[in-house]
Amino acid sequence: MKVMNFKKVLVLAPHTDDGELGAGGFISKLVEEGAEVFYMAFSTAEESVPEGFPKDVLKTEVKAATKVLGIKEENVIIFNYQVRKLNYARQEILEELIRFKRQESDIDLVLIPSINDIHQDHSTIANEGIRAFKTKSIFSYELIWNNLSFNTQSYVSLDQRHIDKKINALKEYKSQGFRDYLSADFIRSLAVARGVQFGVQYAETFEVVRFSIK
């Protein structure tokens, strides 16, 4: 069964890797079912890159990771806003989103961080995403280490291959390998936990910000 027949999807990632962490399995499933997926990353976090890696390494890694999920290279849009300061560029970010919406007016689903996410960059992208795409269906993805609360209003059933692709995509972030939430065990365990809640083997869950039927 197709995932609600979404044909054109936009993933908004405050930082490279956020989209894969929150929705990598869903993205893989959407691509598999024929959806065109666009991925927009707003910061490559050059100031936070560990010693020994090129400052622009996350730009290379996000291209490799999204390729694993099946997203076309030309559909990956990377900005270079300063990490932890996206709120200072709210208007500019909003204008970029509106510019994109004019070019791709038939986007029918937008994936954003939760509006309850406590990271300042994540909340900025969530709110500007809602402003720009308020007439579209909008789902928030889960990043549990930043979510003090998260309403599990929608579940997407996933197969083993979708979780494997998510894990393999995140393995491309070699510069971020020290982070606990990128571990294969964590990714699989969370998918299993959400699957138990939904009565399936694996799942990802989303908050429904808006569900538009036209």
Image (cartoon, rainbow, N blue to C red):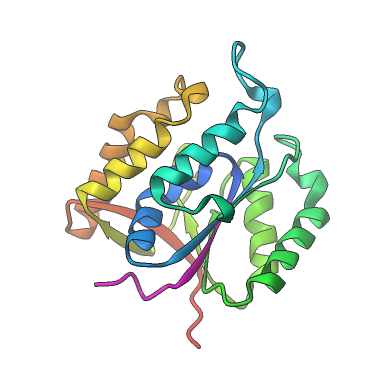
Q: Nearer the viewer, residue 74 or 23?
A: 74
Q: Position of residue 114 (x, y in %)?
A: 54, 53
Q: Nearer the viewer, residue 184 or 195?
A: 184
Q: Which residues are magenta?
A: 1-12
Left or right of 33? Residue 110 is right
Q: Is residue 41 above or below residue 155?
A: above
163 falls in the magenta region: no
Q: Is residue 208 above or below residue 106?
A: above
Residue drawn at x 48%, y 38% as measured from the top left: 64
8 falls in the magenta region: yes
Query: Could you tell me if residue 150 is visible in this image?
Result: yes
For residue 170, which quarter of the picture? top left
For residue 16, which quarter of the picture? top right
Q: Position of residue 198 (x, y in %)?
A: 23, 59
Query: Could you tell me if residue 152 is visible in this image?
Result: no
Residue drawn at x 71%, y 24% as measured from the top left: 47
Residue drawn at x 17%, y 51% as measured from the top left: 201
For residue 98, which quarter of the picture? bottom right
Left or right of 148? Residue 158 is left
Residue drawn at x 31%, y 31% as measured from the top left: 184
Q: Nearer the viewer, residue 47 or 57?
A: 57
Q: Position of residue 71 (x, y in %)?
A: 46, 53
